[in-house]
Amino acid sequence: MTEDIRIFSYLPNPRVWKSLITAKLAEVEVKVIGDKPRNLPKWLWDFDAKKLEDVDSNELTKYKRESKRGFKGDLYKTNEFLDKHPFGTVPAGFNSDGTVGIFESNSIMRAVARASDNHDLYGGTDKLTQSRIDSFLDANLVFAREFQVYVLELTELNDYLYKRMTSVYLFYLDGIEKALTDNSYIVGNELSIADISFVCDFAQFLRERDSEEIINSQGYEIISKNFEEEFPRVCKHLMKLCQKQEFKDVMQDYLDKALAYKK
Ligand SMILES: N[C@@H](CCC(=O)N[C@@H](CS)C(=O)NCC(=O)O)C(=O)O
């Protein structure tokens, strides 16, 4: 079976899980190509991504680019890749023949949802519901970008970064808690890609609990320390979604340790 969407990324990657969970629920074919994070500098980033050992060594210098975010040193990206992915990031999504690049994990997930015959996960045919889902996806990206910086700087925290992350966390979770007051899902009473995106990004954030010692050694507390008590609806929602088979199949035991956290 040919794929509807192809994704190149380091793996495992919660940003890719958004698309994989959506694909399972909406019966879409997604092909994922990638390798462990530390091995991605040894790949040529392209629609037909391949290991550098399979590329003519005389060609390599023309693909060499300085990494910008989340990687150190050089990466190897084709001009075609950068044409389709002007920000040069992974996960990098493509349509089935590689003529269109789709970047930003929420947008790749949306492309997967749109590729399905069944649009229930993305508001069905109701344009306003689709727009409301988009609103949550935007709010989620702001949160995700902020904690990407926090995670990358985790061994060199400072008051500015820590306070900023704390306020973004409280702002975002407060909104999700309110959204869940009268609804069983983030948008209304049906599962949508807003829930999928929330679970994948927030699960990644909760893994700050694995770094408690590093955070404490710099004189700070983990930001999610009181998550269960402060945001009971969000917590219940996260647990409920993680128990769904499609989420479990993709995320496996990723959250077990963070959710078993004892203060
Ligand atoms: N908000 C983006 C984040 C993507 C991103 O920042 N990717 C980084 C790795 S974590 C990257 O590909 N960096 C490439 C580089 O350093 O050149 C998403 O959700 O897809």
Image (cartoon, helix red, strand yellow):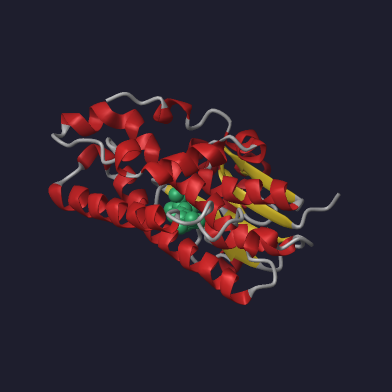
Residue closer to the observer: 202 or 59: 202
230 displayed left or right of 114: left
Res 210 quadrant in image: top left
Residue closer to the observer: 53 or 177: 177
45 over 228 or under it: above or below: below
Q: Residue at x 62, y 42 (%)?
A: 34
Q: Residue at x 62, y 38 (%)?
A: 244
Residue 62 visible in this rendered orientation of the protein: no
Residue closer to the observer: 177 or 261: 177
Residue 186 visible in this rendered orientation of the protein: yes
**Residue 29 appears at what percent x and percent y?**
76, 51
**Residue 126 appears at what percent x and percent y?**
65, 73
Q: Residue at x 61, y 39 (%)?
A: 247
**Residue 83 appears at what percent x and percent y?**
59, 69
Res 156 quadrant in image: top left
**Residue 49 appears at what percent x and percent y?**
66, 50
